[in-house]
Amino acid sequence: MSDYELIVCIVNNGFSETVMDVARAAGAGGGTVMHARGTANKDAEKFFGISVQPEKEMVFIIVSKDVKDGVLHAIYKEVGLQTAGQGIAFSVPVRDAVGLSSRETLATVAAEIKPAEELESEAKSESAEAADGSVAETPDGK
């Protein structure tokens, strides 16, 4: 399990910059924006007392667990359903992550990667075994 959460925010078109501004102010780094189209039905519009703009932007932000709540609350305060952004935001746990700026995560990945020299040595050893006619045993012993 990782120490990260993915925040997903869906807002009306043109509000992704606002989402990112408040998210950064609350401790997030960068994010990814995708253009989307909403499909809310008329009953939902009546129930919530809003009209749904079909053109949307989805903002994906990976944050550490310790800043997640602050980022979510900041986003909702600025672009929530009662604002022109009419946004919703939620988070989901991130099971594994690589490529983030966390040294711990990168160190873990690096520790699992074999150096090129080790891979070459294993390949030479396997070639030598094949050349002398011996058969290498598979991990299951067959």
Image (cartoon, grey):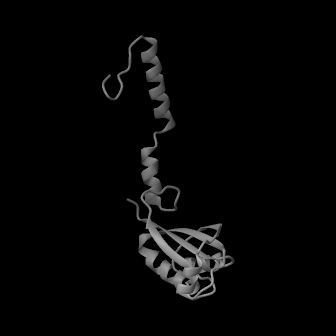
Q: In the figure, 140 relative to 55: above or below?
A: above
Residue 22: quarter of image = bottom right
Identity of the residue drawn at 64% across and 68% down: 36
Toward the viewer: 5 or 30?
5
Which residue is most to the top? 133
Toward the viewer: 96 or 50?
50
Toward the viewer: 80 or 50?
50
Identity of the residue drawn at 58% across and 74% down: 10
Q: Position of residue 127 (x, y in %)?
A: 47, 19
Q: In the figure, 20 relative to 127: above or below?
A: below
Image quadrant occupied by the N terminus: bottom left
Residue 44: quarter of image = bottom right
Identity of the residue drawn at 44% across and 28% down: 122
Q: Position of residue 66 (x, y in %)?
A: 41, 74
Q: Position of residue 87 (x, y in %)?
A: 57, 80
Q: Position of residue 18 (x, y in %)?
A: 63, 80
Residue 140: quarter of image = top left
Q: In the figure, 82 relative to 8: above or below?
A: below
**Side of 53 relative to 64 (left or right):** right
Identity of the residue drawn at 55% across and 84% down: 80
**Side of 34 relative to 9 (left or right):** right
Toward the viewer: 131 or 121?
131
**Side of 73 relative to 32 (left or right):** left
Which residue is most to the front? 43
Q: How many marks?
A: 0
Image quadrant occupied by the C terminus: top left
